[in-house]
Image: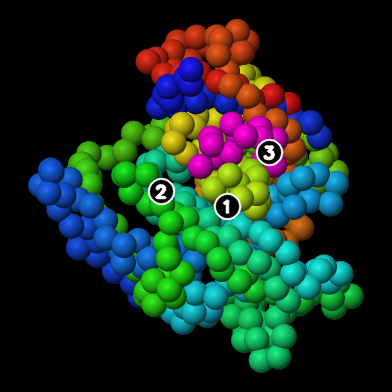
Amino acid sequence: MAMPLRPFLLLVLFIGAAAIPVQNSQDGGEKSSQDSKFPVQTEWAKAETARWMVHMNTWGFLTQQGKATPLHVGTHSFADGAMGKSSGRIWFYLMGGLPESWDASLTMSQAALGNFSCDNTDPEDPRCAKLTVTGTIKKAVGSDVNIGKAALFARHPQMAHWPENHHFTVYELKISHIWMIDFYGGGGDISRWRYFLAKPNHNVPHFPPHKKTSEPEAEDSKAKIIAAPPPHDQVAARARWLVYHSVWATVGTISVHLNGKPWGNVRSVADGLGKNSTGLPYFYLPTPDPTTLDLRANNHIALAFSEAALVDRIDPKTGSNCGGMDAEDPTCARLTLYGSLREVNTYSAYPKTPNCEVRDIISGREVADFQL
């Protein structure tokens, strides 16, 4: 007899090895017939938000088959056109020596756009948009080489100065499938034709209404700049620094709903607080989530982090992260962990975490764990 699905799984990874002129539309949703107070997002509104996500983001996590591992997830910069000139086509500038084409998924988060992009909600909150675009990465040919290069260089000026002896080449993600969640009600697919016809627009319903206050922020609630990372030659320490300060990452899985293609999804993550940091990433996954369904079939994952995602490291004067370097620049730390995830089902799985905090997380829910 099959076990009934429960709302969330708590999991831990065990490691084996110038803004676009858009409007936040007030009509992104229509009222539900069952509840006049709860808006329902239209299919066109979803497509507009997907285009907005692709245009506003400049980097994401690319999930693909690995050479030494079944999966690899890495940080890659991309562009769909110069700012304000979105095409919906996704271009990359990749180092030479790669195949002509291969299957991949590009995952991006609204949380990467800055501290207040998601109105201070958690990156895993459904209102903080998460988008995964799947397809085939293909080497650009003919006029597409110049089209792609113009789009990339407009959004990533540093690319024009990347080493010539690395033989960087323009590639395009030929889109076959689009999945996004940006509001309550669960994620879902967006048709290709609607995606390409839509205009970039952050078109989501405003629910629930945000509370406004005129009270000054307490000192402790103000954004804090994260301390500088350990030196580059202290690789393990720098990796622990990145995992500890990251609040979200991309989980790469073998997709069930896409028949075995590589797939990525943004999930919130934590490895502890202060001295309780363990280096073991924990997750809290809803059971209907595509990632959870993938893990039931195969719990081996690749988990990717990027220093570019640390919004608290953004220089308030310049608005840039990673010292102003591109997210794909080698000086902008990025890390991929490989291993298996398993359900955490006892409090003993948290030897360094106070039980009171765990109870707050798992009360009334199923607990699960993943391992290194």
Give amino acid for label 1.
Answer: Leu
Residue 312's x, y, as percent?
A: 52, 46
Q: Which mark is residue 258?
A: 1
| Residue labelled with disc 3 | 301
| Magenta extent | 290-303
Q: Against 318, is 6 above or below?
A: above
Please tell me in which quadrant of the rendered image residue 45 appears: bottom left
Mark 2 closeness class: few <14, some 14–19, many ≥20 residues within 10 Å = some
Residue drawn at point x = 54 percent, y = 48 percent: 257
Residue drawn at point x = 44 percent, y = 36 percent: 288
Give amino acid for label 3.
Answer: Ile
Residue drawn at point x = 46 percent, y = 31 percent: 287
Q: Visible in this render: residue 158?
A: no
Task: Please tell me whether residue 95 belongs to the stretch shown in magenta.
Answer: no
Q: Against 45, is 280 above or below?
A: above
Give amino acid for label 2.
Answer: Gly
Q: Earlier in the sequence, mark 3 or mark 2?
A: 2
